[in-house]
Image: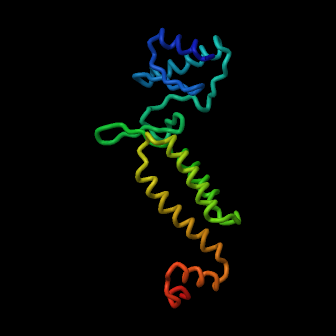
């Protein structure tokens, strides 16, 4: 509500703006125009609305520069004939760190509880990033998570005798289970 005046000002100047809450992307045709808009928007927000603009996050950057452009956790990337939406690298790293915490082997919890927490987290993450192109990333995560869950189960069995017994329950012959 408070930034409605900012929206109206940019509309009167015929400047294309994308805004979600206090996150703002101002679009310009050239780097020079973008630099001028950054300065004028900063002055307007600070002088008229008495808001402080974050100097670290405020910068002029190409929208398709994946490493530098991030808006609500998304980045844009160029393909041969189109521009696609992707999850930003920082968002991917943060999610993988969280998954690593959830599958940590030192928790002392049942594997089913761990799998349920992982499932809830991944469904929430996919629900937010469903518009992004993530097929290859999710395939890699699937392989990585399966290995981590296998390690979790293996550590839970602890003693060699338990490992052999549990492998036998899974249908592996005794000689192979002992190996």
Nearer-the-camera pick, 145 or 171: 171
User: In the image, residue 25 lies at what x, y percent?
Assistant: 50, 26
Compared with 64, 170 (above or below) is below
Q: Residue at x 59, y 32 (%)?
A: 57
Residue 46: quarter of image? top right
- As drawn, the residue found furthest toward the top would be 12
Compared with 154, 71 (above or below) is above
Compared with 143, 71 (above or below) is above
Q: Is residue 16 left or right of residue 93?
A: left
Q: Is residue 16 left or right of residue 91?
A: left
Q: Residue at x 70, y 63 (%)?
A: 107
Residue 86: quarter of image? top left
Nearer-the-camera pick, 129 or 92: 129
- As drawn, the residue found furthest toward the left would be 81
Q: Is residue 124 left or right of residue 48?
A: left
Compared with 22, 176 (above or below) is below
User: In the image, residue 144 lies at what x, y percent?
Assistant: 51, 62
Q: Is residue 67 left or right of residue 3?
A: left
Count of numbered circles in the view: 0
Q: Residue at x 54, y 29 (%)?
A: 59
- As drawn, the residue found furthest toward the bottom would be 175
User: In the image, residue 135 lies at what x, y percent?
Assistant: 41, 51
Nearer-the-camera pick, 156 or 33: 156
Q: Residue at x 55, y 19 (%)?
A: 39
């Amino acid at each position: 509500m408070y930034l409605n005046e900012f929206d109206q000002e940019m509309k009167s100047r015929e400047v294309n703006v994308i805004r979600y809450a206090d996150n703002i992307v101002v679009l310009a045709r050239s780097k020079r125009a973008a630099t001028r808009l950054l300065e004028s928007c900063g002055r307007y927000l600070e002088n008229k609305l008495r808001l402080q603009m974050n100097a670290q996050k405020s910068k002029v950057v190409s929208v398709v520069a994946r490493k530098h452009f991030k808006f609500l956790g998304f980045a844009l990337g160029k393909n041969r004939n189109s521009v696609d939406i992707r999850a930003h690298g920082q968002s991917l790293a943060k999610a993988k760190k969280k998954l690593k915490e959830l599958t940590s082997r030192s928790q002392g919890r049942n594997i089913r509880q761990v799998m349920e927490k992982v499932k809830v987290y991944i469904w929430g993450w996919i629900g937010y990033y469903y518009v992004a192109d993530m097929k290859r990333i999710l395939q890699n995560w699937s392989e990585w998570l399966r290995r981590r869950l296998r390690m979790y189960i293996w550590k839970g069995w602890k003693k060699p005798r338990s490992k052999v017994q549990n492998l036998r329950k899974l249908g592996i012959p005794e000689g192979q289970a002992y190996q």
